[in-house]
Image (cartoon, rainbow, N blue to C red):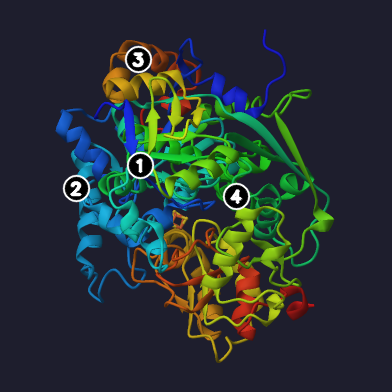
Amino acid sequence: MTGPRTLYEKIWDSHVVEKRDDGTCLIYIDRHLVHEVTSPQAFEGLRATGRKVRRPDLTLAVPDHNLPTTPRVDAEGRRLPIADAMSAQQLAALEQNAPAFGIRYIDAIDREQGIVHVVGPEQGFTLPGCTLVCGDSHTAAHGALGALAFGIGTSEVEHVLATQTLLLKQSKTMEIRVEGTLGFGVSPKDVILAIVGRVGAAGGTGYVVEYTGSVIRDMSIEGRLTISNMAIEHGARSGLIAPDEKTFAYLKGRPMAPSGADWEAAVKWWQTLATDPGAQYDRVVLLDAADIVPNVTWGTSPEDVVPVTGAVPDPESFADASKREAAKKSLDYMGLVPGTRMQDVVVENIFIGSCTNSRIEDLRAAAHVLRGRHIANGVKQALVVPGSGLVKYQAEQEGLDRVFREAGFEWREPGCSACLGMNPDKVPSGERCASTSNRNFMGRQGPGARTHLLSPAMAAAAAVTGRLTDVRELMG
Amino acid sequence: MDKVSVIDGRAYPLGLKNVDTDMIIAAEWLKTTSRAGLGAGAFERLRKDPGNVFDDPEYAGAPIVIAGDNFGCGSSREHAAWAMLDMGLKAVIAPSYSDIFSSNAFKNGILAVVLPQEAIDRLMEVAKTDPIHIDLEHQTVTTRFQDRFTFEIDPFRKHCLMEGLDEIGLTLTMDAQIATFENKAAAERPWMMGEGSA
Ligand code: SF4
C-alpha cells in the first residue's frame, strides 16, 4: 500500500511504463496536440528514419500560430491565400503531414479551429488524469482540468509521435494555495500574475505545481485555464488543479469526451484523483485573496508585476545584482522611468486574446466594460481575437461582437495573433500594448514592441481611457 | 548526434539572468521547416545592444556561453538550441536552466553545465581574457589559473551525450513493454485509450 499521494503522484504512478535504476521513468502519453511551428522537423525526422506514428488516434493537429486573423475565405467561400510565404509553407507542411501520418487534423477554415490550448479542453480531448503534451510551453493550461500537461521540444514531439512515451524524471511538488474571496474587479488573470510576481520567473523550476484553496475551487473552469496557462511563467512545467464536479460538468457532452457507460466509469476514476489528505508537497506557497488587486506588468519578464495602483519600481530597489541589471535593461526597453504611476502609462495598442484569455468568459468580461463606451483617440489598434471558431460563434450569438465593434475594436478570426510576432498581427516597434497574453518578453509581440500584461477587463478599461487604468475605478 | 566529451575554447561572458527563448531566437525565425540556418538569428535582440559580447571580435566563434539564472526560460522552441548549435555553441554554463531548455539542449548535444553563482562570477572574469575547459567525463570546468569546478549531471544524460545515442531508437527497443502498458491501460481506462475516444 502506498501512503497519501498528491494528484501529480497519482497521475504519474498510473503512467509509468518502466522505471530505471537511476529513477528515470518511461511515461506513457495519453494525448498529444500538434501545431505547425514545432512539428515539421519532427515529421521530417520520422521520415528520415522510416518511423511511423504509434498512436495517431491519440494525436490531434491544429494550426494556430502562423494563421492571419483576417478572413480566411472570400465571399464565395473560397480559401484565401496566405501572403507570407514561409508561414504558408509551414502551415502547408502540417496540412500534409497530419493525413500522411494518419493524424486527425482540424483545418484552418473549420469552426473547431483555434489555439491548441483552447481547442483541447473545448473538444474534450483533454481529460482529467491524462498525460498530455504539446510542442508548446503553455500546454500547462490543460492542467486546469486535472491533466498532467506540459510543453515539450521538437525532439520530444518526435519521440512521442514514434513511441507515445517520454523519458522523464519525477518532479518535486509545490502547492500554491490561494484562500479567501476575490474582490470586485479582480480576475483569475490577476491571481496568476500575483502568483508569478511572488514565486518569480524561475521559482517553480523543477516543480510540478498544484493550485489549491477556496479561490481556485470557487473559480470557473475557464478561470482555472487562465491560471494553469501561466504555470510556465513561474518556471513550472505543469500546473495542476484537482478535477471536481465543475470539471465533469464542463466536459460532459463535449465531442471527444467519453459518453455512456464510459463516462460513468471515467467520472468514477476521476473522483479518486484529488490529493489525499495528509499528502506532502515539497514546497507550499500561500496567498491571501484579500491581498490580490488588479495587476499589470512593468518590465520584460512576467515576474515584473505591480498593482495597477502602483508605480514603476526603481531598479536600485532590488537586492539582487543580476535583477538590478535586468530591471535596468527592461526599463530601457520599455521606455519607462522609475516612479512613474502605472496609471499614467499611455498605450496605443490593445490586444484581447491568446490561450490565456480568449475564451467566452474573457470576452464577456471585456465586453461588459466596453458596453456603451468607446476606445480613446490615442488607441491606434484594438484587437479582439477569440480563442477558437466555437468561441467566436458563441460570442456572436450573444451579440458581443457588436459590443466590441461599436466600441471601436476589430473582431478577428481565431489564432495566436498578437501574442507572438509570427503572423501579421504585431505591435509596432516602440509602441505599447495592453495585452491579455502571457508573455512580455522583449520583442514578443513584434520587434521593439512593449507589452503590459493584464486581464481582459483591464485591457478593455485601458482601451477606453488610452492608458493603463484601474477597472474598479472605471466601473465603480 | 555527435559525441560530446571535451569542450575547450573561449566563452561569451553574457552573465544575464532570465535569458528567454525569444532573446535566443525570435518568433520571426520559427517559420522554418528545417533545423539549419538559424544561427544568423541567434541572440538577435541582444545583438542590438552596441558593445554586446556576441559581436565582440574578442569572442568570435566561442563554443561556450556563460549566463545567469534561469537560462532558456519561456517557450518550448527547440529552435533556440538549433540556433545556438548553428552559431557554433557547444556548451552553456549557468546557475540554472528552464526545464524545457535543458532537455532541448541535451537532445541536441549541447552541454548545459550547472555551477553556483560564485563559480559563474569567477568564470565571467576568466572568460574576458582566457579560454575555459569543460571535461564531461570528469565533470569539471577548469581554467589555466588552477580554477577547478565540478558539476553534477544526470548519469543517463551523460552516457547518451558521451555515446551520441539516439533516444528514440533506445525507446523503440522497449516496444513490448509499451504494448503491455497499452493493453493494461485500455482495460482499466477504456475511455482514455479506446478507439474513437480521441
Ligand atoms: S496564444 Fe500565445 S502563448 Fe498561446 S499558444 Fe499561441 S503563441 Fe503560444
Say whether marks 3 and 1 touch (CB < 8 Å).
no
Residue in view at x 64 percent, y 54 percent: A321
Q: Earlier in the sequence, mark 1 or mark 4?
A: 1
Q: What mark, if any, has residue B179 been given in the picture? A: 3
Q: CA distance from mark 1 to mark 4?
A: 30 Å
Determine the residue located farthest toward the bottom in the rendered image.
A377
Instruction: Pinpoint the chain carrying mark 4.
Output: A
Tag 2 residue? A96
Q: Earlier in the sequence, mark 2 or mark 1?
A: 1
Instruction: Pinpoint the chain carrying mark 1.
Output: A
Packing grade of label 1 (10 A; few <14, some 14-19, many >=20) is: many
Q: CA distance from mark 3 to mark 4?
A: 39 Å
A324 to B130, vertically: above or below:
below
Dot 1 and dot 4 within a common chain: yes
Q: CA distance from mark 3 to mark 1?
A: 21 Å
A87 to A106, vertically: above or below:
below
Q: Where does the C terminus of chain B fall, quadrant-wise?
A: top left
Q: Position of residue A306 (x, y in %)?
A: 70, 64
Tag 1 residue? A60
Picture quadrant where residue A87 is located: bottom left
Circle 4 SS class: loop
